Amino acid sequence: MAGVLKDLEQLVSRDNPMGLRWAAPVYLTFTDYLKELGASGGRERVSLLLEADGEARREEVTISALPGLVDPEQINIKLIPPKIKNASPRPTYMARMNENYWFEKLADGKTVYFQFNQVQNQAGESLDDFALRLRHFLAENGIANLIVDVRHNNGGEATLLRELYRTLVNFETTRQDARIYVLIGRNTFSAAQQFVSHLDHMTAAVFAGEPSGSKPNRAGDESRFVLPYSGVQGAVASGYYQAAAKDDRIWIAPAVPVELSSTDYFGQRDPVLEAVLEIISGGATPAKP
């Protein structure tokens, strides 16, 4: 598998190395890619040898390819909850992934967890209205710590972010010892990358998790096309965004680096949120890298 992932580097467009780690699981479901990389003998079906970690058990399964063309709109590029019978309750970061944005006060009474899954308005409450509601809640409830989770956020419409920026800056500048923690990962991309890049410059936010999936200064605004004769589909960036004039970083690096392992994922654990909550309870805030 490691060899196949390495070979995918020549086929996967990306802004930085995290982009390959994000996209590779999707590309490995396409039989054309597997055949091209020598991992499969044909395009109609793929044979896999599965081994249970720590157990002397191996099983070979054959998966048939779906007929017809793949609709890009139907490709899921986000992490999904594990499909395991009798699994433990979903952790917070997996609980409400179908909502673009939501928040809740945590048990300590002084921390709010805000999950931001897509930079798009959602039915019943625009992002502006949500940002105002969040601002009032933070002020009226004496919140000291705000955790902003954008690990599932692969973008949207960046022009919708203005009121949310105001809310976060207001939170940090109007109360003593206020702290913002931003959870990022390989899926933090496009308009979400723009969001965290601006937070990096405008606030003293502490980033935790994996490096982000794009650059602070990046190309964006995907425009799709279909070649007229072959019918091949593609996409090209039509815009360029700068968070700062001379920012040559390839990603936003976390001050608190924590990876989500397969053991954590299938065990329904969130080591990134756990690490941040431990920092909050201990009172020591890491410096930016």
Image (spheres, helix red, strand yellow):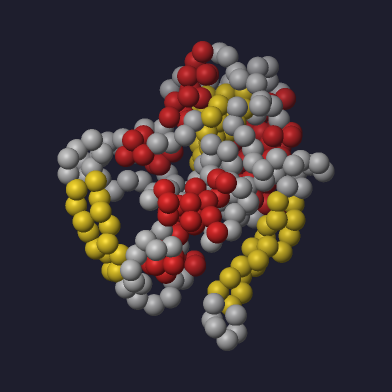
Of 179 and 127, which appears nearest the observer?
179
Of 177 and 192, which appears nearest the observer?
192
Question: What residue is at 54 percent from the left and 83 percent from the top?
Answer: 230
102 over 172 or under it: above or below: below
Query: On the picture, is 146 further left or further right than 73?
Result: right
Q: Is residue 48 visible?
A: yes
Q: Position of residue 192 (x, y in %)?
A: 61, 47
Q: Is residue 140 visible?
A: no
81 over 281 or under it: above or below: below
Q: Residue furthest bottom?
A: 229
Question: What residue is at 71 percent from the left and 23 percent from the top?
Answer: 174
178 over 151 or under it: above or below: above
Q: Position of residue 3 (x, y in %)?
A: 42, 51
Q: Residue furthest right?
A: 245
Question: What residue is at 59 percent from the left and 42 percent from the top?
Answer: 212
Q: Position of residue 284 (x, y in %)?
A: 58, 14
Question: What residue is at 22 percent from the left and 59 percent from the top?
Answer: 61
Image quadrant containing the C terminus:
top right
Q: Position of residue 22 (x, y in %)?
A: 50, 49
Of 207 and 24, which appears nearest the observer?
24
Query: On the picture, is 198 further left or further right than 11?
Result: right
Query: On the picture, is 24 further left or further right than 88?
Result: right
Number of marks? 0
Residue 222, picture quadrant: bottom right
